[in-house]
Image (tube, rainbow, N blue to C red):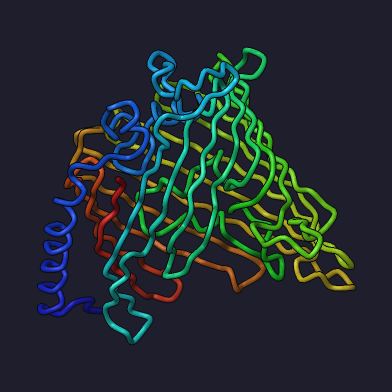
Amino acid sequence: MKLFTKPKIVLVVVLIAFVATIIIPCISQAIPAFARKYRMSCNTCHAPIPRLKAYGDDFAGNGFVLADQDAPRFYVDTGDEELDLIREFPFAVRMDGYLKYQSETDKDFDFSAPYNLKLLSGGALTKDIAYYFYFYFSEHGEIVGIEDAYLMFNNLFGQDLDVYIGQFAVSDPLFKGEVRLTYEGYQIYKARVGDSSSSNLSYDRGLMVTLGLETGTDIILEIVNGNGLPEADDFRVFDNDKYKNFAGRISQDVAEFLRLGAFGYYGQEGMTYTNKLWMAGGDMTLAYDDKLELNLQYLHRNDDNPCFEEVKPPEVETKGGFAELIFMPNGERSRLYGTLLYNKIDSDDDNIDYESFTTHIGYMVQTNLRLIAENVYDIENEEHKVIVGFVSGF
């Protein structure tokens, strides 16, 4: 099947050039909040944006603080030793825009810019206490509101023990969807079975505890409402039932190039009729010399009554995961990079079955601006989604 005629190819090339011409002069003198604060390149933590390097993970895990650089100069001197006020309140913006072609529609090309537009802020409130949040001005053309928003208590009891309270993605300890390189997401994390429309590994409200050991072992526990991010009810309560859901993960650095992890989730939801569910799986990251990275995720989910029926039907099993390969020929300094992503969901609930293969190429015009071209092939329906556009942070 032909995806493009010659005029369409010319149109894509012209539009990419136009976007680059307009965006580059505006963004080249702007850098994100943490880079502004420490006067360092975004490349210190990201390669390419928004993908986190190990250093970026460590920085976030330390409460957005560089221990050897934070000093009183970052706070206002009010004369009150018990008051720490950030001297310059940190803000950053992420804006993504695309031109899309989807073969399953008859609408031809679509201008999807901005596709994402959000305001981010985060930093240390005082020693070992930090915050982070972002507000989605627009996602898919709608005002979403707040997704990530939490307070972090760092290095409790003199150990690498952190506590987060607020809103976060349950899957964050696995692979963070917010920092992926592709337009296509990690579909297994968003899978919703039957009428169980809220218990998945996407955003939720709760508590997360992380512990890092000198052996290279990370242990993470989560307690969440289990119903996503709905508005509060008439009693100003966010949870829609009396149950709490629990998740845990353990990961181990086996070698400098290999990390293995295991994950489990257990919960119950509903009022008159309930659904008990559990998830279990494993993950792996295999890296070579900052040039090649392979991420693997497998999850198995079991629901005993996802449609909340009076007489429980047979249990519903869902299996799936993804494989992601990232190639950066010159390591973290690569301007050109490539990504392959395979998604698979196989469920007794046929409505959520999914299989796709994504090819993605990106080019770093600036450290905080990249152009992308991507093709998502829906294997089951034999349909293509072609995206070209930009991802920026400033």
- With respect to residue 43, does 391 lie above or below? below
Q: 272 or 122: which is nearer to us? A: 122
Residue 201 horizontal/vertical position (percent) = 61, 52
Q: Residue at x 37, y 58 (%)?
A: 183
Numbered disc total: 0
Place of residue 118 in the rendered image (x, y in percent of width and height, measured from the top left): 41, 54
- Vertical arrangement, residue 155 with respect to residue 336, above or below: above
Residue occupying image coordinates x 31% and y 49% = 339
Residue at (51, 62) in percent of width and height: 144
Indicate the position of residue 145 as horizontal and vertical percent values: 53, 59
* Residue 6 higher or lower than 83, as above or below: below
Residue 190: which quarter of the image? bottom right
Residue 10 quadrant: bottom left
Quadrant of residue 140 in the image?
bottom left
User: In the image, what residue occupies the spot 19% across and 49% down?
Assistant: 363
Residue 253 is situated, as x and y percent measured from the top left of the image, at 50, 24
Location of the N terminus by quadrant is bottom left
Furthest residue to the front? 79
Q: Residue furthest bottom?
A: 106
Q: Quadrant of the C terminus?
A: top left
